[in-house]
Image (cartoon, coloured by chain):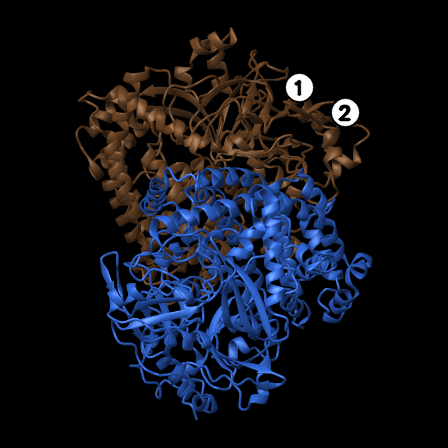
Chain colours: A brown, B blue
Amino acid sequence: MRRFARSATLFTAVAALPLAAARADEGMWTFDAFPTARMQADYGWAPDQAWLDRVRGAAVRLTGGCSASFVSDSGLILTNHHCVAPCLQDLSSASKDYLKSGYTTRARSEEQLCPGQQAEVVSAIRDVTGDVKSAIGSATGGAAVKARTAAAATIEKAGCPDTATTRCQVVSLYGGGQYKLYTYRKYSDVRIVWAPESRAPQFGGDPDNFNFPRYSMDASFLRAYENGKPVTTPQHLKWVARAPVEGEATFVVGNPGSTQRGLTTEQLAFQREVTAPLNVALFSELRGRLITAMAQSPARAREGKEELDGIENSLKVYIGRVKALSDPAFMGKIAAAEADLKAKSAGNAAIGNPWGDVATAVTAFRDIYLPARFVTPSSDLYGYAHTLVRATAERAKPNGERLPGFSDSALPLLEKQLLDARPITPWLDRLMLEWSLSKAREYLGPDDAQIKLMLGKESPEGMAARLVSTTRMADPAYRKQLWQGGKAAVDASKDPMIVLARKLDGRERELQALIDERYSGPLTVAGAKIADARFAAYGDANYPDATFTLRISYGKVMGWTQRGKLVPSRTLIGGTFDRATGSDPFDLPTAFVTNRARIDSSKTYNFVTTNDIIGGNSGSPVIDKNGAVIGAAFDGNIDSLGGNYGYDGTLNRTVVVSTDAIQEALEKIYPAPALAAELRGR
Amino acid sequence: MRRFARSATLFTAVAALPLAAARADEGMWTFDAFPTARMQADYGWAPDQAWLDRVRGAAVRLTGGCSASFVSDSGLILTNHHCVAPCLQDLSSASKDYLKSGYTTRARSEEQLCPGQQAEVVSAIRDVTGDVKSAIGSATGGAAVKARTAAAATIEKAGCPDTATTRCQVVSLYGGGQYKLYTYRKYSDVRIVWAPESRAPQFGGDPDNFNFPRYSMDASFLRAYENGKPVTTPQHLKWVARAPVEGEATFVVGNPGSTQRGLTTEQLAFQREVTAPLNVALFSELRGRLITAMAQSPARAREGKEELDGIENSLKVYIGRVKALSDPAFMGKIAAAEADLKAKSAGNAAIGNPWGDVATAVTAFRDIYLPARFVTPSSDLYGYAHTLVRATAERAKPNGERLPGFSDSALPLLEKQLLDARPITPWLDRLMLEWSLSKAREYLGPDDAQIKLMLGKESPEGMAARLVSTTRMADPAYRKQLWQGGKAAVDASKDPMIVLARKLDGRERELQALIDERYSGPLTVAGAKIADARFAAYGDANYPDATFTLRISYGKVMGWTQRGKLVPSRTLIGGTFDRATGSDPFDLPTAFVTNRARIDSSKTYNFVTTNDIIGGNSGSPVIDKNGAVIGAAFDGNIDSLGGNYGYDGTLNRTVVVSTDAIQEALEKIYPAPALAAELRGR
């Protein structure tokens, strides 16, 4: 599954740098720079502007970290099951387990709000490179970051005076080579419509995740509401329940979260040596803690499931990255591309040696990374406190002087996520907190000043137990009270999570300033120069690294050869019955057993395409030449785990659940007659 | 802590290759090749043969994976607390927790047997290189391994006709450059005499493990018995309770378990890319599973503690290795040494290109590694079944035709470990089994033939629960019955663990044969050639990689500089009180609190030396020029975690608990007057 977990760390925003020229089927293109000529040359056909505009108007970004599309004129949204799983988890209780049973509705009145979820559709893209670059001017270090942040906040505020229905975001593309203002029509009331029992999308579980052949019903439907009513969405994709044709062209339209294909070799070395192994160690241990905790009771198994799925998914990605970063052939190509660009840029005085500047910044970052990594404990409850402490302090400043993430344009979503009621599972929150506090102490050491500030004389276990059992952060009314009371109310609060967040806030700001000065600032300047070098060397034959903004990728339905064996491009629904063992996670979904006689085994279930995607693309519509949706992308194959760093068309594949299979589910397995009719346009 | 967990995998035996010339204080020297001239040059003094012989006769190897020494004439053995922790765990119950309370005896009749433990003292070392090499002759691949194994079995059997009191082992040194027959006087009745409460050795817990300054009472005493009586050991070390003198020469005498300082760059690349990250992922998850399981009840916390300590210790080692393997400077030195040796060997036709042969073998190994790694589930109960299935089959063959580990010379210890009664903790065994089965499926994939053979249609969780709840392997009488009944009894058994072990046995033999043919065999031949190249280039100025056989290292009492800050060479007992926070693992040992007024705070507690050690050296006596013991080595500092691959005298340190501190404990903290008197020689 390819959900994109956006991270709240201090240093993610600036990683994306510009890339070398893309090869066949490679690329996550922006809608204002689709490579028409290249696709025309490769496929004998390419979409025109009207096609692109139509598709763009139906593409939905889900703020939970997924992609989606409108598929009816009444705000109906197609996405993946794993994108709505957090919502199903939030709505479930001991008596109603929607992950286990699935979610079906007899009437629209049964469609329930998904806490924290917001749907966004791009309505305009405007180039603001000149404004941002001139605001930065010749500033360096922390001053460059400040200038860029202020310029973005000002542009966003001016662009979206109506914050109730619109959202503006300035996006840095090509690592600072371009800045664009994305304007979104936003829908902050998103409700769940239909989801199969989770055994169907999760058939094969973690063992089959990122693998193919695959048998997964990873599809669900949401609906956007406004003023209590479904929104009208004339610009939706046509739903066609059909099998894909081998070799046919496919488009994936969605929001790839983050790629790092433009990193310099120094940055990659840092990941190989430090961050990638660290992530494997941290998340492996968390996974182990959670697996055992969940085995203690059926209730815990239910309550922890969504979290575990996310962790296992991330872990597979990290392990794949370690593999890619350790592969001399894979890394050799990247080094060769860098060498080529350096050679082409030699003697260009305006460019200078930005690679050297990046190397210097990475060296400085090595000393700041671990403290920054561990300054924010992982816990939903702490997260609320952290947001309250920071946001109320930032909100009190002028818009242009705030930290990134707290501008006027960012506050409405932040407020929604802070105040929407959602259940907290105390044992799970405590487990997360205990893990993150103990790992902080492990990696920084018990004698570190930051650790002493964080823990005092408490143990991680004791502190986690105390905080979770005594905080009021689980209460939305109390959060609202502090939010409305502002900095004064937060400063006066004796809530232990707030107390801890206040205590760590100064250290976090200190680290942020260090990072801006020594790492993000230099990268902002060097990134723009590397971008200029790339534009000079390769023209516009490249695409920017992914930034969780709307992209389009083209490719085709095609299998691949793995260790000398051809992997066919599709599976059939009937294959599920052959693969089932009766044991978790290969046990048949209940409804598959019940309805076996009625199910058409020959329907295409999942298929693969050569489209270039990454986490965040989950739920993206897979669209045919006619602009009709023929599936929802939900995964990549195992080889695509190196996709963070590069694309290999011979091996990388997107995994899709077909509309044909979803239609079969709606009609025979998890019947939803009204929904099926709505999709048929009736 | 530096315990050495000997692994039962199919491919550990052949890793040790010869090294380049050692630098100051570097080296784990064999007793028949002590670098007298070099030490004389550096220190102005070196031990003579009589000194070496005397010390050797007092040095004890503990088969559980530790080192030790006789310190009285009545078989009294000094070692680390963490070396006897498994014994304390085995002897504990819900009503008596010896890890928590410590172990003290009022009379020798209270000294209890440690299950599976055996003490061994080297009585002779004989060069058998000619015999083994001529048996191998010009054989290659699997035939070379077979010939070597058969020759060793024959030599060992002839060398030790009395298997009740002696043990013979042929050891491959310098990666096959030399073979030596080690003869041991063995004592298979080893009893626990004294251990402090585990809070004292484990003060600081995992956070402080492999760190310094340190405050740990990691010492314990055992006693060797024979025929129900303490053995007489005139050749023991003199016990001197004193503080070390800054800069004084120190010797560490013990059994370093395994180093890999002679690996070629190809072998190191394989570790960096495959084994090291895999170990981090696997053991991090296991750690997490165990931490949560232990938090469920005080009983589980007690029962799982020893296992968790071992896992956390191993994990720190693996993380340290990943760091070393990813450090360009560290690896650069190794590559330079290899290049130097190649250059010096160029044109020597007798040597040829063994590095190329190693590279070919590593490439072949890449395909076999994962299946071999996961063919043996991790579980004490499965371990018994695995031993029974294999040993009864091998025992039926002539001595020279058996697999390594099952020769007549190896069977007595194997039998003792199989049949000694020790408690099994079902939940823990199930946890281990579930983890290892699920990881096997994760890394080989659910469609792999070996996984299908292993799991059938069961889930790892279901299978683990079934096996642990229905096997009789926990019953020593049943194990004895099968052991005595031999292959026929084992073949007839319906015990589910035996059934699984029988099912996997064929696959394991198939993998073993593949490894011998493509990896171990070629390495045996290439290793001997690289050894010849090294002897030709550097003479005898080097030492063989560690092999869990007796070595001596010399060095001195000295602090070091860490990130620009001097770390002094010692801590004082009183520092414990300053470092205590009251929270686990920094809570004061109960007896420290109770006896605070009596304790002499100024006694040296722990100290560091430049001696070159590695896991397996735990419990090694630290000896002064006079041959008196002044401490027990129990750990290395964090920089020494790269010690597997190389030694850096500016950073690597051995961590020692002083005899002065142990004496203080025996007199005032955990009083043992008889023991204190025995140490004073009364």
Closer to the camera, B666 or B554?
B554
Quadrant of residue B218 in the image? bottom left
The answer to whether residue A627 is left or right of residue B352 is: right
> SS of the residue at dot 2?
loop
Find disc 2 in the rendering and name its residue: A600
For the question of whether residue A493 can be seen, the reply is no
The answer to whether residue B194 is left or right of residue A271 is: right
The answer to whether residue A96 is left or right of residue B608 is: right
Cα separation, mark 1 vs mark 2, equals 14 Å
Task: Please provide percent x and percent y for residue A272.
Answer: 40, 41
Task: Please provide percent x and percent y for residue B436.
Answer: 61, 52
Closer to the camera, A197 or B184?
B184
Mark 1 crowd level (few <14, some 14–19, many ≥20, 10 Å Cα): some
The answer to whether residue B88 is left or right of residue A667 is: left
Q: Residue at x 45, y 91 (%)?
A: B673
Residue at mark 1: chain: A
Closer to the camera, A76 or A527?
A527
Residue at the bottom extreme of this rendering: B682
Q: Residue at x 30, y 22 (%)?
A: A341
Find disc 1 in the rendering and name its residue: A241
> SS of the residue at dot 1?
loop
Task: Please provide percent x and percent y for residue A171.
Answer: 35, 28
Q: In the figure, A573 relative to A301: above or below?
A: above
Q: Quadrant of the C terminus of chain A?
A: top right
Q: Which mark is residue A459?
A: none
Q: Residue at x 23, y 34 (%)?
A: A357
Q: Which amino acid type is shown beneath numbered disc 2? A: Asp
Q: Quadrant of the N terminus of chain A?
A: top right
Task: Please provide percent x and percent y for residue B263.
Answer: 43, 48
Q: Nearer the viewer, mark 1 or mark 2?
A: 2
Residue at mark 2: chain: A
